Image: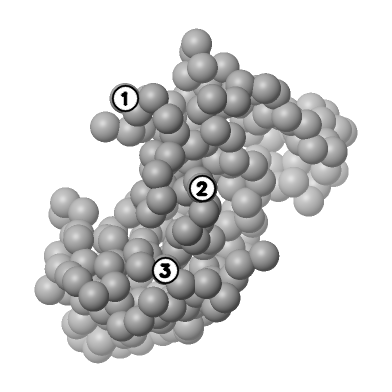
Amino acid sequence: AQKVTQAQTEISVVEKEDVTLDCVYETRDTTYYLFWYKQPPSGELVFLIRRNSFDEQNEISGRYSWNFQKSTSSFNFTITASQVVDSAVYFCALSEATYGQNFVFGPGTRLSVLP
Amino acid sequence: GAVVSQHPSRVICKSGTSVKIECRSLDFQATTMFWYRQFPKQSLMLMATSNEGSKATYEQGVEKDKFLINHASLTLSTLTVTSAHPEDSSFYICSAPRLTSYNEQFFGPGTRLTVL
């Protein structure tokens, strides 16, 4: 069975601080995808990144970066120089690599960036 | 990019009434669509998988007679909450996978259901 754990329920930081959101996953599949989504108060999920299990390269996109470590089954997300607009709930998710598979979401981490 | 729409975005109804929520893939076809439910301050939980041309499959604990799913076409799936009660109040989100080399999925904007 697949499972995603996000140990941090809520995090509060002051603007311009760096913050890392943890994600640990469990799966028996050898091929899978990992995702991060942002959910602002409106509720609509905002896609941030998809990572294939074969690709362990870290990725950077602006102030966002992701650290994928297969050895520890972790896919952590770091926001550098956080901003108030980063305040939201962030979900890590996992799916099988084949077409038409549902996502398994972690419990989410609520990030509050204070001015 | 691909878009999935949901209608309505928000609905308030009285206890005992039925509510229909539509999920449409606007620029691609989807033989499968997923329905998730999200209670306040909780994560998204898969309720059911909607299959075009066949019956939906439901996750354990989800009442199929209460949550009716119809995948009427390759671009439309509907979720009907029958005889809604206050405990059905939740945020309902659908997703549709687009056939590519990987599991590319697109989420609808969600429907917030409040049952009084």
Say which quarter of the image contains residue A13: top right
Work out whether residue A6 can be spotted: yes
Kindly identify the residue that appears in the image at 44 percent across and 33 percent down.
A32
Q: Please, what secondary structure does the residue beneath circle 3 have?
A: loop
Residue B101 circle label: 2
Q: Secondary structure at mark 2?
A: loop
Q: Position of residue B50 (x, y in %)?
A: 29, 67
Residue annotated with mark 3: B30
How has the structure been colored for display? one colour
Residue found at x 19% / y 71%: B54
Identify the residue at image location x=21%, y=81%: B82
Subunit bearing disc 1: A
Give yes or no for contact between labels 2 and 1 (Cβ–Cβ under 8 Å): no
Q: Is residue B13 above or below residue B64?
A: below
Q: Which mark is residue A28?
A: 1
Q: Earlier in the sequence, mark 2 or mark 3?
A: 3
Residue B61 image position (x, y, % from top left):
16, 54
Write down the chain letter for disc 2. B
Q: Nearer the viewer, mark 1 or mark 3?
A: 3
Mark 1 and mark 3 residues within 8 Å of each other at the beta carbon: no
CA distance for labels 2 and 3:
15 Å
Q: Chain of mark 3?
A: B
User: Do tags 1 and 3 sit on the same chain?
Assistant: no
Which residue lies at the image location 62% right of the left edge and 60% below the top edge?
A: A41
Name the one closer to the observer, B3 or A110.
B3
Q: Residues within 10 Å of mark 1 (few under 14, many from 20)?
A: few
Left or right of B13? Residue B10 is right
Name the residue type under label 3.
Ala
- What is the x, y in percent for residue B88? 29, 69
Q: Can the viewer see residue B81?
A: no
Callout 2 amino acid: Ser
